[in-house]
Image (tube, rainbow, N blue to C red):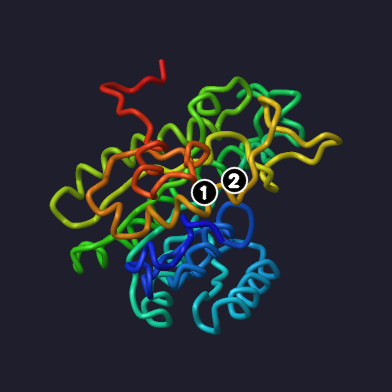
Amino acid sequence: MNSSSDTSIYPSLKDRVAIITGGGRGLGYEMAMSLVGAGAKVAITSAREAGELKSVEEEAAETAGPGRLIALQADVRSYADCERVVAATLKQLGGLHCLVNNAGRGMGLIHPNYVEERPRFWEAPLEGWEEVVDTNLNGVFRMTRAAAPHMIAQGFGKIINVSTSDVTIVRVGYSPYGPTKAALEAMTRIWAQDLEGTGVTANVFLPGGATDTKILPVMANKRGADGGLLQPDIMRAPILWLCADQSNEHSSERYIARLWDDSLAPDDAATAMRDQHHEKPGIL
């Protein structure tokens, strides 16, 4: 275990409670297991993959003890599901301090081989378009709308929205996925301002490149649009800092996991992965 995930560095994570949507695999799984290993308690969700959820719950019980991680089948496209996740987390884990909005749908719903063929927007199936938008954007709002009142009432909370790289946001053939992440980042910046003075923060977190997860299409030589792939465990070390007290004074910021440097002290590594602030949106 490297120093960035040593539980002694983040004592505030002991029994801190986080919800991670889309936690059954990929980025969500890595973040959930990292937090549980650092002493936190975690609720993970998935809309469809009950088998994956059960597997992660069993693994967490073996490595960290029973009851440290609960798995809840829930769809962020349903506000009733979001409310149920918050209620179950509070009841079973005893609190709620962090929300990691990681659940998302990718371009596979638009075209099965979007990396190579780059579908145009007018070719998109309506059902696929609507599911991507409703999950990646409206789903984040629903989940946060359900969780935020509790955080505000207790005067503490961390909202972490998982995004994508700048180039992907405006990449040809990546609509609607890219635009949903552009909207997510704008929404996060607005929320951070809305939350000023409440003790609740809102930040953006992203891998910093295509990652080797199931969101990518099945292909002979699996790769991202720019070639190489990052491994999902790139999210493990930074999520600890983002959920710990070290990040308390940070809001309306954008963190790129690829830039985290394990050789640095955590606060210095966080500074290194913090994206520069932009005075105005840089989409066009």
- Horizontal side of residue 12 vs 215, given as left or right: left
- Horizontal side of residue 6 vs 176, given as left or right: left
Residue at 52%, 75% (x, y): give it: 69
Q: Position of residue 240 (x, y in %)?
A: 43, 57
Decide which of tag 1 and tag 2 comes sooner along the chain. Answer: 2
SS class, disc 2: loop
Quadrant for the C terminus, please.
Answer: top left
Q: Position of residue 234 (x, y in %)?
A: 56, 47
Which quadrant of the structure image shows residue 189? top left
Q: Nearer the viewer, residue 25 or 246?
A: 246
Residue type of the residue flagged with mark 1: Thr
Per the image, the residue denoted by label 1 is: 135
Per the image, the residue denoted by label 2 is: 105
Q: Position of residue 48 (x, y in %)?
A: 64, 62
Which quadrant of the structure image shows residue 71? bottom right
SS class, disc 1: helix
